[in-house]
Image (spheres, helix red, strand yellow):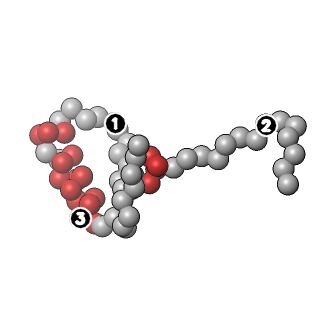
Amino acid sequence: MTRRRRRVGTGEDVAHLCRFLLSDAAAFINGADIVIDGGALAAFEPPRPVAVGSEQR
């Protein structure tokens, strides 16, 4: 279960990630997309498809 943060991200949040990526601890990370959105993308549930032939009202 993913829980979203209930606040808007700050420049400091991004700075923490940048500091980590510039450190030796991130030396093995290569070519990754890292999303900094407080869990909003992970908690997103796409709409369910409608069965073909079903009527929508």
Sequence order check, earlier mark of 1 and 3: 3
Please tell me whether residue 41 is drawn above or below residue 13 in the rendered image: above
What's the CA distance linking mark 1 and mark 3?
23 Å
Q: Badge 1: how crowded within 10 Å, few (<14), some, or many (20+)?
A: few
Q: Does 27 appear above or below 35?
A: above
Q: As shown in the figure, which amino acid type bears the numbered disc 3?
A: Glu
Measuring from the top left, give residue 3's x and y in whole percent.
39, 51
Number of numbered callouts drawn: 3
Estimate the spatial distance between the alpha carbons at disc 2 and disc 3, rounded to whole Å. 45 Å
The N terminus appears in which quarter of the rendering?
A: top left
Quadrant location of the C terminus in the rendered image: bottom right
Note whether 26 is above or below 35 in the view shown. above
What percent of the width, then of the height, locates residue 40? 44, 54
What residue sits 83% from the left and 36% below the top? 52
Q: Secondary structure at mark 2?
A: loop
**Type of residue at label 1?**
Gly
Q: Disc number at residue 12?
A: 3
Q: Is residue 30 left or right of residue 3?
A: left
Q: Amino acid at mark 2?
A: Ala
- According to the picture, the residue beneath numbered tag 2 turns out to be 51
| Crowd band around label 3 with a 10 angstrom C-alpha radius: few (<14), some (14–19), many (20+) | few
Cβ atoms under marks 2 and 3 closer than 8 Å = no
Q: Dots 2 and 1: beta carbons under 8 Å?
A: no
Q: Residue at x 17, y 36 (%)?
A: 27
Viewer-proximal residue among 18 and 46? 46
**Residue on which the image places disc 1:** 31
At a point 23% along the width and 64% down the height, the residue shown is 12
Quadrant of the rendered image containing residue 34: top left
Q: Which of these two is toward me, 38 or 4?
A: 4
**Within-10-Å neighbours for mark 2: few <14, some 14–19, many 20+:** few
